[in-house]
Amino acid sequence: MSSNDTAALVDNRVRALSILDSLQETLDDDDAHFTVSLDFLDRFHHALDLLESTGEDMALFRVPDHVVVRAIPGRTNVTPHVLRESFIQRVREVRSYFRIRGAVLERAAELGERPERLIGFEAPAVV
């Protein structure tokens, strides 16, 4: 992998985490009755796409369809949106995952240990 490729991966990760931070700050600052528009969902999934482009598996963190409220033409007057608490939870989960993983990897490097041992998991020995 060239240094340009590595720089692009790092840049995508930084962009994604910046989007997540921005979403979190915006949601924390807004009134609790504020509806989370589908634009927020699109930004969130764009951040996950950027992280996936760096080799991360983000499938677990995607917002499931059952928390997205969509208008049914001619049958409802609802503005499409995402259920607020479910969305906030997903944003926090991703940010927490990278914060915890970063701390574990940093500590593992300091101690010269494998990260698996620091989180209380070590794969069974193959016999």
Image (cartoon, rainbow, N blue to C red):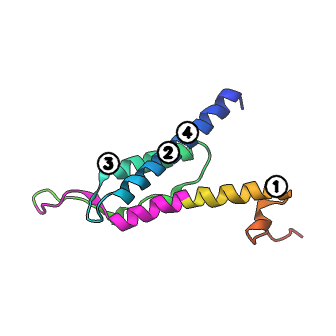
Residue beneath disc 4: 12
State which tag comes first along the sequence, 1 or 3: 3
User: Magenta stretch: residue 85 in it?
Assistant: yes
**Labels 1 and 2: the sequence-earlier one:** 2
Residue placed furthest toward the left: 74
Look at the numbered discs 2 and 3 and tell me whether their residues touch, using CB distance below 8 Å. Answer: no
Q: Among all residues in the image, which is located at the extreme right?
A: 127
Residue neighbourhood size for the residue with mark 1, other residues' Cα within 10 Å, grouped as few (<14), some (14–19), many (≥20): few
Q: Amino acid at mark 2?
A: Ser
Q: Quadrant of the C terminus?
A: bottom right
How far apart are the two marked residues, 3 and 4, measured between alpha carbons?
A: 20 Å
Q: How would you rate the neighbour count of disc 2 (Cα within 10 Å): few for under 14, some for 14-19, many for 20 or more?
A: few
* Circle 1/circle 2 CB separation < 8 Å: no
Indicate left or right for 41 with 72 as reference: right
Percent x, y for residue 78? 17, 61
Q: Element at badge 1?
A: helix
The residue stretch that appears in magenta: 75-95
Q: Are marks 1 and 3 in contact (CB under 8 Å)?
A: no
Quadrant in which the N terminus is drawn? top right
SS label for mark 2: helix
Task: State left or right for residue 55 relative to residue 64.
Answer: right
Drawn side of residue 79 relative to residue 50, left or right: left
- Residue 39: numbered disc: 3
Disc 1 marks a residue whose amino acid type is Glu
Residue 50 or 30: which is nearer the viewer?
30
> Which mark is in front, 1 or 3?
1
41 in relation to 84, above or below: above
Name the residue carrying label 1.
110
Q: Amino acid at mark 3?
A: Asp
